[in-house]
Amino acid sequence: MQSTNGHGSRRVILYARVSTEEQARSGYSLAQQLEALREYAAREGYEVLEEVTDPGQSGASLERPGMDRVRDLVAAGGVSVVLAQDRDRFAREPAYHYLLRREFEEYGCKVRALNDRGDDSPEGELTDGILDQLAKYERAKVAERTRRGLLRKAREGKLIAGHVPNYGFRYNQARDGYVVDDERMTIVRRIFRMVGAEGMPIHRVKRVLEREGVPTAKGASYWNNTSIRDILLDDVYKPHSYAELEVLMTPEVAAKLNPEERYGIWWFNRRRVSVRQVTETSSDGRSYRRHQKTVFRPREEWIAVPVPDAGVPRELVDRAREAIADNRRPSSAGDRFWELSGGVFFCGVCGCRMRPDRKRRSSRDGRLYYYYRCPTRHRKGKDACSQGCSYRAEETEALAWGFVSDLLKDPDRLRAGLERMIDRERDGLRGDPEGGATAWLRKLAEADSKRARFQDMAAEGLVTFDELRAKLVELDETRRNAERELSLLQNRAERLEALQRDKDTVLASLEGPLIKGLDELAPEERHQLYKMLRIRLTAYPDGDLELNGEFSGKLCVCTSDATQGGACRIPITTAGPPTFGGLTASRCGATAPIGTFWTSAGPSPTSPHNKGPTR
């Protein structure tokens, strides 16, 4: 850098920046940069006005707290030079260098770096510009080499190690593969069992893990619903056969696998993530927010890396994923449990699940209000969905619970509905389950017997090894099919047993004085009952709510004024009115008050919830 000793103003700002990645990769540190800058300033006789740092900030943008501070100081006047160790400490784009230089020149300030090669002449600016472009090219080249190196490593069947491995695994010594962590993998298998076999919602799984003190992947005490969902959807826990993996990997990687075993898949190159920082100015000052954009790459660009089998049955994985297939991302709408979310409350226009709305704070009393709204209407507008109502959460939940609790307080009605649901589940089993299991067990025994005979024939030279290999592949496929069908039969039988057990448990808990505890159930427990009873609450644009259960028909909960033409949403068929747990529904009368439950005998004045949701 050319000396300015003895010329003009001597006030300087020292600027240092480092990103976390740079510090780890190249040994940059803020202390090292500032030390070099102080030495230069002392040697040149500069008066240091301020030392400004930008720790953990990218040079790909000028929106940084430290850089904003530098620009504010320069705009205030009296600064002759802003000094950095390297030109790329100011910015990584040549265009940003030009912008800063022109901006600072308006205030009589210059931008200098210790590695400058030119001067203030046009030739000097050209030299520094060429060097900036070469540095940018070299960074792009290094980034591309790194990207291609990671792709090559993944195509060789090796993991790209991150900060934390998938829950239930740990890295091998070379950090390019997984080893099963038996203690944690037991928790993973239990999560799949609770969701896939026992029908628990994700939030209840979270509560169980926290109550038992099970640590998360990072050792925290509290689980996140999203992290549990990610476990259920990650192919690293789903067993894949050799035939499935063979078409996804190179022949060299497939040749290293055991055709007799199953493997999970760790995917690489699935998405591209870009992060940029945005500056926001308010009455409280300037704040910085990082905006992350994720774009999924085409499926053909994904790279499959085999990992050890997690030990979770394939059918259990499929059932767990099916159970959460229609779930939505956990809402950030507030710090309460939304008992009608997760597949209970639906929009009657577009069919989407009603989503918890963000809390709204009253300017008068500071209270918090919670709502359910249609996400389609919220995202795409009224042209996509005419559902214009937002439903007050407390009142809607109380209204729904008022009917369900009345149903639960009549064990005879509830028993009839539960038995019908179990009968339908039993009718869904194809043929004779016991006979089917016996047939598939016989098939397994035959496959094992044939395998031994073919191996004996190959040992005696009666068949070639190519013929033996083909026969063994055929037998393996037969065995997999038999094991899959046996697993299906077992899962269906277990589901039927779980339904029967739940029915007995619910009915037993509703006998005697325990029935009084219904009004004290927590929102999570109410939600679990809704899911077990297959309750579905539907909202219509005019404010009407329709409550029904899959196993026992429908009931209308009117929230519009019947004197203004409001009517039940119950379809009346020639076979007679539908019923809900033995309760018959019919059309509303002309004098029905808002929010009244209706039966064939007329309105139910004993319902404690007669006020409809606020719109």
Image: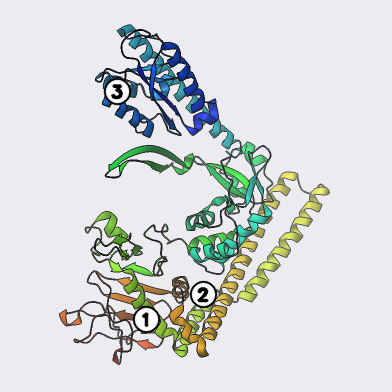
- The answer to whether the residue labelled 2 contacts the one labelled 3, judged by CB atoms less than 8 Å apart, is no
Which residue is under mark 1? 402
Q: Amino acid at mark 2?
A: Gly
**Separation of residues labelled 3 and 1 (CA atoms):** 65 Å
- First in sequence: mark 3 vs mark 1: 3
Given the current orientation, which residue lies at the most extreme right position? 460
Question: Relative to residue 32, is residue 62 drawn left or right?
Answer: left
Binning the other alpha carbons within 10 Å of mark 3 as few (below 14), some (14 to 19) or many (20 upward) gives: few
> Is residue 446 among what the camera can see?
yes
Q: Amino acid at mark 1?
A: Gly
Q: Residue at x 62, y 70 (%)?
A: 490
Q: Name the spot of residue 457 as percent of width and height, x first.
A: 80, 52
Which mark, by number, is residue 428? Answer: 2
Which mark, by number, is residue 36? Answer: none
Decide which of 5, 181 is in the foreground and name it.
5
Q: To which quarter of the image does residue 400 belong?
A: bottom left
Decide which of 475, 199 is in the foreground and name it.
199
**Separation of residues labelled 2 and 3 (CA atoms):** 70 Å
- First in sequence: mark 2 vs mark 1: 1
Q: How many marks?
A: 3
Camera-side mark, 3 or 1 = 3
**Separation of residues labelled 2 and 1 (CA atoms):** 32 Å
Q: Residue at x 58, y 51 (%)?
A: 217
Q: Name the spot of residue 422 as percent of width and height, x first.
A: 51, 80
Q: Amino acid at mark 3?
A: Leu
